[in-house]
Image (cartoon, rainbow, N blue to C red):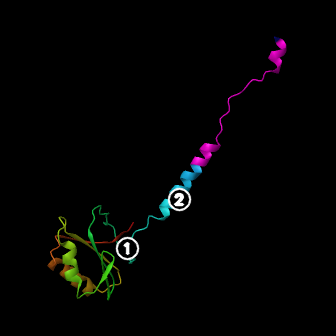
């Protein structure tokens, strides 16, 4: 009996960490790639900064004013002449009629006021002005 005892090996438990390491790296790559694609959609404008700016979780109608001849209604370019009719179509049938204005800080004040006036005439119930939160 003793000669069999000497030839047997004692098996120690071993934990293979290779699959766990692979999963950690896959999760790391997944989060790195998915965070790179979370960009704010829409027209790029240089927004003014405000300390009281806050996020709006609702899906509103977005009016972007990027320049004198660059007005967008939900990322669709519109002229100032057709803006009111296009906005009325966008507002038609919506329960929540909130319009958010996203104007570049270099756009003329008169143009912004003109667009605000058209929005009110079109039947919007609420208006909001987009701004970057300053610190």
Q: Which residue is mark 2?
A: 32
Residue at image point 20% right, 76% down:
89
Secondary structure type for disc 1: loop
Place of residue 120 in the rendered image (x, y in percent of width and height, measured from the top left): 16, 77
Q: Measured from the top left, where is residue 132 in percent x and y?
A: 36, 70
Q: Is residue 4 left or right of residue 40?
A: right
Q: Residue at x 30, y 74 (%)?
A: 74
Vertical placement of residue 109 versus 129, above or below: below
Q: CA distance from mark 2 to mark 1?
A: 22 Å
Give above or below for 101 relative to 79.
above
* Quadrant showing the N terminus: top right
Looking at the image, residue 17 lies above or below residue 96: above
Instruction: Give the residue pinned by disc 1.
Output: 42
> Residue 7: horizontal and vertical position, in percent?
82, 21
Which picture quadrant has residue 105?
A: bottom left
Q: Closer to the camera, 39 or 53?
A: 39
Mark 1 Cα shell of 10 Å, populated few (<14), some (14-19), many (≥20): few
Magenta segment, which residues? 2-23
State yes or no: residue 9 in magenta.
Answer: yes
Q: Residue at x 47, y 65 (%)?
A: 37
Left or right placement of residue 128 versus residue 31 in this view: left
Q: Badge 2, how many Cα within 10 Å: few under 14, some, many 20+?
A: few
């Amino acid at each position: 009996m003793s000669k069999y005892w000497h030839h047997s090996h004692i098996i120690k438990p071993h934990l293979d960490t290779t699959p766990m390491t692979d999963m950690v790296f896959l999760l790391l790559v997944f989060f790195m790639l998915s965070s790179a694609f979370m960009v704010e959609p829409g027209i790029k404008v240089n927004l003014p900064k405000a300390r009281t700016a806050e996020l709006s979780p609702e899906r509103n109608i977005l009016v972007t004013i990027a320049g004198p001849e660059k007005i967008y209604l939900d990322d669709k370019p519109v002229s100032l002449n057709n803006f009111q009719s296009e906005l009325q179509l966008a507002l038609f049938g919506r329960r929540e009629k909130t319009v958010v204005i996203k104007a570049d800080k270099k756009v003329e004040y008169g143009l912004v006021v003109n667009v605000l006036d058209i929005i009110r005439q079109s039947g919007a119930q609420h208006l909001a002005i987009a701004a970057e939160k300053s610190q």
